[in-house]
Image (cartoon, rainbow, N blue to C red):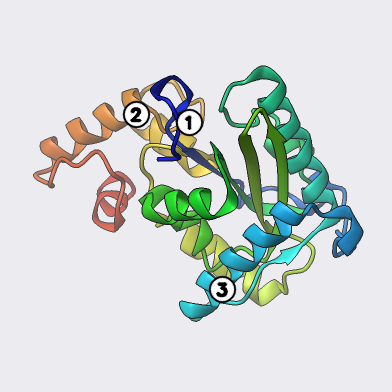
Amino acid sequence: MPTGSPSRRRALLTRLAVASTLGVTSVGGAIALAAPAHAVSSDASAYLARMNAERVNHGLPALTMRTDLNTVAQGWANHMAAANLLSHNPNLTSQVANWQTVGENVGEGPDVATLDTEFWNSPAHKANILDSSYRDVGIGTTFTDGILWITIDFRKPMAAESSRTVATARTSTVHRTLRLGSCGHDVARVQRRLHIHADGVFGPRTKRAVARFQRHHHLRATGVVNHRTWLKLHP
């Protein structure tokens, strides 16, 4: 956790959103441009370098910083700092265009190095950082009263994908592992199968329902929708 007094320390949060069936016409066909260097803060640039180094070390391509994602991420970092509250952007999927999958990491801490360590040590945040489908990223940072607020928005773009890649992604998304913090079309699909309210957000209620389903089908009751659970949910 970032250093500081207990009243200033908050858990880092993560959330993913997936819309593999979203039509191309629904995203407006926008193509994002790479962000110019002058539009990016030094803290954002420093974190991008650290994150891309981690991806490259794991055999993944570096993420490309995009102007439109930077705008969304910076707006949310400013919002968190003004509200003095760590939270996720509830409008992420509507503010970001041209996406098949989007994800977000947010945090607060004393500096980039500390936040980088905390993200890396959190399995859910690390999963976003090392998601092989992501190609674009936007980073927003705000430093207020000794606290660095950061938002990292990830995107797997729609328009930049070839038809072959899109087809592969749509097939593989069916078996994406879902857990606390996941959200999107596939979460809603599971919720409907479990006959609970399908809001597309994998929270404690969904975890409990998944665990009950797993016990009923003689699976390990982890509350995580892995490949075996997918097969039972949709034989």
What crowding class fits label 3: few (fewer than 14 Cα within 10 Å), some (14-19), or many (20 or more)? some
Question: Quick one: 234 or 15, which is closer to the camera?
Answer: 15
- Residue type at numbered disc 1: Val
Determine the image quadrant of residue 83: top right
Which mark identifies residue 53? 3
User: What separation in Å lies between label 2 and label 3 (alpha carbons)?
Assistant: 35 Å
The residue under the point 57% across, 64% down is 51
What crowding class fits label 2: few (fewer than 14 Cα within 10 Å), some (14-19), or many (20 or more)? many
Side of 129 where 216 appears, left or right: left
Which mark identifies residue 201? 1
Query: On screen, 38 above or below 71?
Result: below
The earlier-in-sequence mark between 2 and 3 is 3
Q: Position of residue 102 (x, y in %)?
A: 63, 49
Give the quadrant of the N terminus. top left
The residue under the point 77% across, 49% down is 69
Query: On screen, 190 above or below 157?
Result: above
Tags 2 and 3 in contact by the CB under 8 Å rule? Answer: no
User: What separation in Å lies between label 2 and label 1 (alpha carbons)?
Assistant: 8 Å
- Residue type at numbered disc 2: Thr
User: What separation in Å lies between label 1 and label 3 (alpha carbons)?
Assistant: 31 Å
- Residue type at numbered disc 3: Ala
Q: Label 2, on which residue?
A: 206
User: Foreground mark, 2 or 3?
Assistant: 3
What crowding class fits label 1: few (fewer than 14 Cα within 10 Å), some (14-19), or many (20 or more)? many
